[in-house]
Image (cartoon, grey):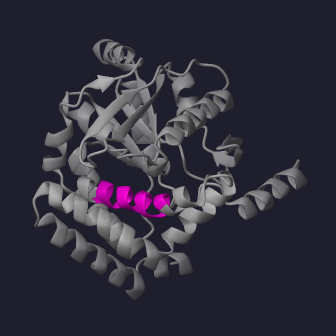
Amino acid sequence: MSRENRAQTGPAAWLSNLAVRAMLGIALALPYGARVRLMGWLAARVIAPLAGYTKRVRANLDLVCPDLPEAEKRRLIRAVPNNVGRTLIEIYSGQEFIDRVKDVPLTGPGAEALDEAHRTKRPVVLVTGHFGNYDVPRAALTGRGYQVGALYNPMKNSYFNAHYEAAIGTIGRPLFPRGRKGYGQMLRFLKDGHMLGFLVDQFMARGADLTFFGKPALTALSAAELAVKYDALLVPIYGIRREDGINFDIVVEPPIPHTDAAEMTQALNDSLEALTRQHMDQWFWIHRRWKPEKYARIMKNRADKA
């Protein structure tokens, strides 16, 4: 077993998971609205400072939005982890969460195309980001009888991943973990005319050299490549949190035209960026999306091998 794997299953990982499970258990004992508000508060006021997320939010904002007023940065340092905490407990709320979002109408210019694809069993690659609550569209579509699979990255903490996978599986299945086995299952599911969900906003060391918020952001092309290969619609879709902090709107954007995979993926990045600029507190600024130092090393290695 590698050093990395031992760390993921060692005492520190176990204790970290224990603390998270305790907070989740306390929150889940409360009525739905109270638990969502509580987890938002805990994430913003307790977890984010301890985990270093407040510093990461500021660092990301300083990198890509250097002209943002200081007061707005301070607001986002609290508001972003608040949304993340709410999202986590919503996902763990299972059927209660599904019941709240399953009847949310699909809005936006791509909603009709999505319904048509469902009726004709044309494959669809749904793409969203770590924004609002990214599982709202999947829960709503599943509740309507759509077959929606999801590709996901297993969490590094294996103790946490076990119950997290169970939680997201309650919202909808099948789930396909990244890797050869999951990828093969995912392809068969898509070819059968179903819908498949992707998250586009993760730093991928082998990804294409694209941009997000005007900065280099290595991005996987797999969603666009699958759409082209299997003649699937490539559809940006988002669950946008309303001002009340509890309810959502679901926005479906027009399908991305089939061109070059890099061009299509950049269009996905641009879509997410445009929406984030409208709702700055709803994107997960706690992510290491850009990693400028690692990006520079990767690009140097690519240039040396060229």
Q: Is residue 23 above or below residue 285?
A: below
Residue at 83%, 57% (x, y): give it: 301
Q: Is residue 2 visible?
A: no
User: 64 and 302: which one is in front?
Assistant: 64
User: 97 and 121: which one is in front?
Assistant: 97
**Tally of numbered tags:** 0
User: 142 and 236: which one is in front?
Assistant: 236
Residue at 11%, 64% (x, y): give it: 30
Residue at 21%, 38% (x, y): give it: 101
Left or right for 262, reference 113: right
User: 182 and 54: which one is in front?
Assistant: 54
Query: In the image, is residue 40 part of the stretch drawn in magenta?
Result: no
Q: Is residue 78 above or below residue 221?
A: below
Assign the magenta stretch its main secondary structure.
helix
Residue 194, position as x, y percentages in the image: 34, 27
Q: Is residue 134 above or below residue 166?
A: above
Tell which residue pokes out farthest to the bottom in this image.
Answer: 11
Q: Give the magenta range.
A: 75-88
Residue at 36%, 80% (x, y): give it: 16
Residue 53, position as x, y percentages in the image: 49, 69
Left or right for 56, reference 102: right
Residue 235, position as x, y percentages in the image: 46, 26
Q: Is residue 269 visible?
A: yes
Q: Quadrant of residue 166?
A: bottom left
Residue 236, position as x, y percentages in the image: 46, 30
Query: In the image, is residue 78 part of the stretch drawn in magenta?
Result: yes
